[in-house]
Image (cartoon, rainbow, N blue to C red):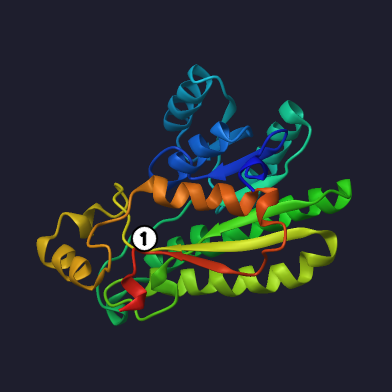
Amino acid sequence: MADSISLQDKVAIVTGGSRGIGEAIARAMARAGARVVVASRKIDGCERVVSEIEQAGGEALAVACHTGKPEQIEALMKTVLDRFGKVDVLVNNAATNPYFGPMIQLAWAAWDKTFEVNVKGYFEMARVVARHLIERGAPGAIVNLASVLGQDAAPMQGIYGMTKAAVISMTKTLSVELGGANIRVNAIAPGLIETRFSQAMTSNKQILDMVLERTSLKRVGKPDDVAQAAVLLASDAASYITGETLVIDGGWTAS
């Protein structure tokens, strides 16, 4: 089994790969042998990650892409195919959460931005990669980053939670529709992970204490806790796993 947890000879796109969970996934996939495309809105962060992957002996490519914009996704795919000739793995990780507060006070601009990136971006990336795989007649794996907030109530983060619930639903349906083409689609639902994205929560003692009290392992997760699971789901070791959402939350939802 250990030998099969490999991404050797595979090309993987990781969106939101310039920091946090996405960066950890990009690095882990490179270590597992993949040629990794690090995509994010800001090229500087992507180039930093790519440089460090290459210094460690891996192969990677930095591409600027706002995944909420279909034309930028099309340009991303063209760049990747020009460089590597194929895509085998997609990790949908780019996300935003611009509003923290009661749902009824949300402004539509925040709604539009959250759904554009977290749902439309995931769907269009998945659709473009799936079409490429079908045209090649090749198997593939799509890993969508969801959240435990998509499976439960999400007070003060309700709109974000709604988008992650949509991602879980999308994952299940795509897994059924694409299974016949041997394209596996799974999701990962992290709990509280220590990143800049979650800093508003991890730096708030009241919120942090509440989370830790309910979390069986009594700690906040690290990006690498999620990255290793993404490598597994993308690899041939998970060849009979599809349509699933793997919760990585230290036991938070078990309480």
Query: Which residue is painted at 14% across and 60% down in the image?
Result: 204
Within 10 Å of disc 1 (Cα), the crowding (few <14, some 14-19, many 20+) is some
Q: Quadrant of the C terminus?
A: bottom left
Find disc 1 in the rendering and name its residue: 97
Position of residue 202 measured from the top left corner of the image (x, y, whole percent): 20, 56
* Outermost residue to the left: 205
Left of 96 or right of it: where is 169?
A: right
Query: Which residue is painted at 77% across and 70% down in the image?
Result: 177
Left of 237 or right of it: where is 183?
A: right
The answer to whether 96 is drawn above or below residue 163 in the figure is above
Left of 245 or right of it: where is 236?
A: right
Q: Kindly tell me whether residue 93 is visible in this rendering.
A: no
Left of 134 or right of it: where is 218?
A: left
Among the 4 quarters of the image, the one containing residue 154: bottom left
Report the amino acid beneath label 1.
Asn
Position of residue 8 measured from the top left corner of the image (x, y, whole percent): 69, 34
The answer to whether 195 is drawn above or below residue 170 in the figure is above
Query: Which residue is painted at 73% across and 41% down in the image?
Result: 87
Please state which of residues 56 and 93 is positioned toward the viewer in this rendering: 56
Query: Which residue is painted at 62% across and 70% down in the image?
Result: 170
Among the 4 quarters of the image, the one containing residue 208: bottom left
